[in-house]
Amino acid sequence: MTALTTPSLRRHAGALWQLAKPKVVALIVFCAVIGMVLAVPGWPDPGRMLAATLGIALVAGAAAMINCLVERTIDARMRRTARRATASGELGAAETLLVALTALGLGMALLIALVNALTAWLTLATFAGYAIVYTLLLKPNTPQNIVIGGASGAMPPILGWAAMTGEVSAMAMVLFLIIYTWTPPHFWTLALYRRDDYARAGLPMLPLTHGQPFTTLSILLYTVLLAAVTLLPLALQAAGAVYLLAILLLNARFVLLAARLHRHYADDSARRCFRWSIQFLTWLFAALLLDRVFFLPLSG
């Protein structure tokens, strides 16, 4: 390797890294790890936890790269995504596909060899759900794309739970349901203030097909539904006072922002609601973890 080639190699590696959507993968891994910790008494086996985390991260990154590859023409028409290496032509389709499939293979190998078969197949199904079903079939064809396709994005806690126990319990399904219900209001707030981008791309996002008032009302109704769903860990007696206090505060903020967005729409309000939705999910799972450490039962 010569000094002259080093900068180009770094740019190349950086472009591939960005195609893997590291911020999204970090949130996926965070939710999966919380699922691992909640699944077993005490602390999970460190070796299995590391293998599961790396395997899930690699497959999630591969799915993101396939998504960028498939949508490169659409991305080129959107201001938010036009600089992606696949959209700009910096990276070719063959190279991107090779790296994505390599990451997928490595992730699956880790999960099969060092975790368990259930986690491996559930992770592969999640990959197919996002990279193929959502990206190819749902996103370009229906405004309900994120409602149906959100099932793939809600899988991380189930993957983490299965990695530690080899099964999927009722609590794992509740964690899935929380993320599944959270996904539409999270995504629709983004689609509202990026609606011009989606219009240029020709994608049938809800603000374009049904208008802003319908979308903001849908966001408000989903946040109310989410507030109810987030109480299910308490109903299962899988969380205590720490989680209860946190979730009441988190839901109050989310519903208030959604109500303001519906009553007086502004792009800045949509951005604020979108940013809070990310914080909401992060703090919710952090509250579950803290509740596990400092569990205070709600009844004797």
Image (cartoon, helix red, strand yellow):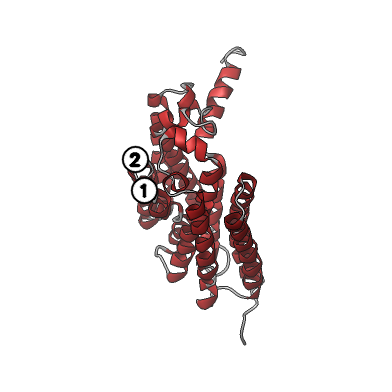
Q: Is tag 1's residue or tag 2's residue first in the polypeptide sequence?
A: 1
| Residue 138 x %, y % | 35, 46
Q: Residues within 10 Å of mark 1 (few under 14, many from 20)?
A: many
Where 131 sits versus 283, above or below?
above
Where 89 sits versus 32, above or below?
above
| Residue 223 x %, y % | 54, 62
Is there any visible trace of residue 133 in the rendered image? yes
| Residue 5 x %, y % | 57, 15
Mark 1–mark 2 distance (CA, rounded to whole Å):
10 Å
Residue at the spot x=46%, y=58% of the render? 180
Please state which of residues 229 and 194 is positioned toward the viewer in this rendering. Answer: 194
Q: Secondary structure at mark 1?
A: helix
Is there any visible trace of residue 102 in the rendered image? no
Please state which of residues 277 and 258 is positioned toward the viewer in this rendering. Answer: 258
Give the amino acid at mark 2: Leu
Q: Which residue is mark 1?
A: 129
What label does residue 203 carry, if any?
Answer: none
| Residue 128 x %, y % | 35, 46
Residue at the spot x=41%, y=39% of the render? 203
Q: Which residue is mark 2?
A: 136
Identify the image quadrant of residue 1: top right
Q: Secondary structure at mark 2?
A: helix
